[in-house]
Image: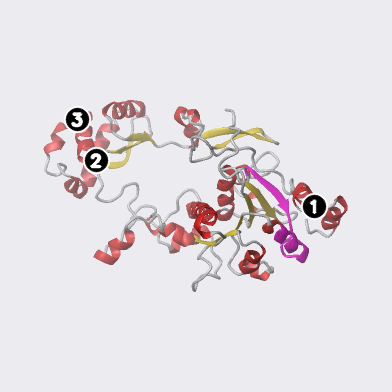
Amino acid sequence: MSLSLSRGPLANFKVIEIGSFIAGPFCGQLLADLGAEVIKIEPPKSGDTMRTWGSSRTPNGDSLWWPVIGRNKKSMTLDLRSKKGQEILKKLVAESDVLVENFRPGTLNDWNLSVESLSELNENLIIAQVSGYGQTGPYSKKPGFGSVAESISGLRNLTGYPDLPPTRVGISIGDSLAGLFATVGVLASLVARDNELGCGQNVDVAITESILAVMESIIPEYTANGAVRERSGPILPKLAPSNIYPTIDGNYVLIAANADKLFKKLARAIQKPELIDDIRYSTHLSRGENQAGLDKVIENWTITKSTTEILNLMTQEGIPAGPVNDVSDVVTDPHFLEREAIVRVPHEELGHINMQGAFPKLSKTPATIRWAGVKLGEHTDMILRERLGYTHAAINSLRDGKII
């Protein structure tokens, strides 16, 4: 699949990304996908931790996560603990639109890079700060990983089965949500800056609050009625039928027919029209009260059919349903392939690497993937020379001093 040559809607914006792991760099990835020039600042020698993270690696031992979260970014090494490194960052900030960082609150102050001082250098600068608990509050100085934020914000308590300990979602969902909210904050701040506000502002993103934002109605459920939502496995209590069901070929299908019209269609499709008038299942409320029994009726039907047979019938009848795919199914799914939700990107070591595409899809200025994550410090010399006017001798001196 060819990659689009669109410059993207953020092509005229310059972003500096400092920090590591997922939340801040995911924001940088999204901004870069949308066309922003993102310069990722990494520690000399070690680089971003994401260069070594993940369970699968290339033949050379490099992370297969890095090509994704590092894509479309320029890599520059810089020791931000050193005075000279701090001075170089300030020069970059002075001519940039956005700074994204995800250190523990207070770290920038320790490095003489306070928000106040950076804003004085560039009043148009938008500073997005991502942390576990936010920049203020009694927990703000505590170390905060996404996994801990998922736990303290109530998500882990809802994940898994009621008779087993809490589990986790199979991805780092808390970090990714924080990266998304940071991106929303940056985009909103750019609009405000270039319209009525006329200057930059700070974007304070807590992973905990990013998780709370997607926790549906659990807070009013408790404060209004004292209801504490608990783990419920693959279902949402009282919403039926909507579950995964086994098939004769050893797979599962998800069928979601938890609306009156859809349920009537499903009852006829599985040749159980008598369910429509059965007092246990005739209304949304009664189906919720008899959820387990209804799921068993549906399961007794799906277990006699193949996955393909079930899904074809559901599509024919207009009932939402789908397979429970693993990644091998996802990467060969014709729908994902046609929409370029999975794309093939050049990779120096592997030749090419497949990864998820750039989303959302914009009709006139689409987000793109222009290159996979690059080698550590690949653009250091170019940035110093072309952006900041450093001479070859000055760059060598910085390298000799281990600043870069």
Compared with 115, 258 (above or below) is: above
Q: Nearer the viewer, mark 3 or mark 1?
A: 1
Which region shows up in magenta?
A: 71-91
Q: Which mark is residue 268?
A: 3
The amino acid beneath tag 2 is Lys
Task: Write the residue at 75% across / 50% down.
Answer: 380
Closer to viewer: mark 2 or mark 3: 3
Residue 401 lies, with reference to residue 258, above or below; the image says below
Q: Is residue 252 visible?
A: no
Q: Dot 2 corresponds to which residue?
A: 296
Q: CA distance from mark 2 to mark 1?
A: 71 Å
Q: Residue furthest right?
A: 393
Q: Spatial distance from mark 3 to mark 1, Cα to Cα?
A: 73 Å
Q: Earlier in the sequence, mark 2 or mark 1?
A: 2
Does the magenta segment cover residue 76?
yes
- Which percent across, then down, holds residue 54? 59, 47
Label 2 Cα neighbours within 10 Å, binned few <14 / some 14-19 / many ≥20: few
Q: Earlier in the sequence, mark 2 or mark 3?
A: 3
Mark-to-mark CA distance, 2 and 3: 16 Å
Left/right of residue 35 with respect to residue 226 in the rendered view: right
Q: Between residue 338 and residue 234, name the one nearer to us.
A: 338
Q: Are marks 2 and 3 in contact (CB under 8 Å)?
A: no
Q: Which residue lies under the disc numbered 1? A: 389
**Residue 68: image x %, image y %?**
59, 43
Residue 75 position in % (x across, y down)? 70, 48
Q: Residues within 10 Å of mark 1 (few under 14, many from 20)?
A: few
